[in-house]
Amino acid sequence: MQGIIQGDAVSSLLFNDLAQLYRAGRFPIDRLLSCYDFADIDTAFEDAGRSDSARVAR
């Protein structure tokens, strides 16, 4: 077992690895994102609060 404090990833390597996994169809980031128009900001905050979205973006 290994503990982690504030992350243990090397960003320059992690992003490259995630991009390769995404291109190979093995990292479905599209399913983790939700996009809202600014007019729907209240809905976005509600969804984020309920954890209906892993990440809310505009």
Image: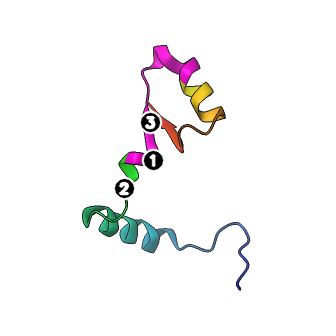
Say if the magenta span includes residue 35: yes
Residue 44 in percent (x, y) is at 54, 26
User: In this figure, which residue is indicated by the disc labeled 3?
Assistant: 34
Which quadrant holds residue 49? top right
Considering the image in quadrants, where does the N terminus appear? Answer: bottom right
Residue placed furthest toward the bottom = 1
Relative to 16, residue 53 above or below: above
Residue placed furthest toward the left = 24
Q: Is residue 47 left or right of residue 18?
A: right
Q: What predominant SS class does the magenta segment belong to? A: helix
* Mark 1 vs mark 2, CA separation in Å: 7 Å
Report the amino acid beneath label 1: Leu
Q: Is residue 42 left or right of residue 36?
A: right
Say if the magenta span includes residue 53: no
Report the amino acid beneath label 3: Ser
The span picked out in magenta is: 31-43
Q: Which of the numbered marks, if any, corresponds to residue 28?
A: 2
Question: Tag 1's secondary structure?
Answer: helix
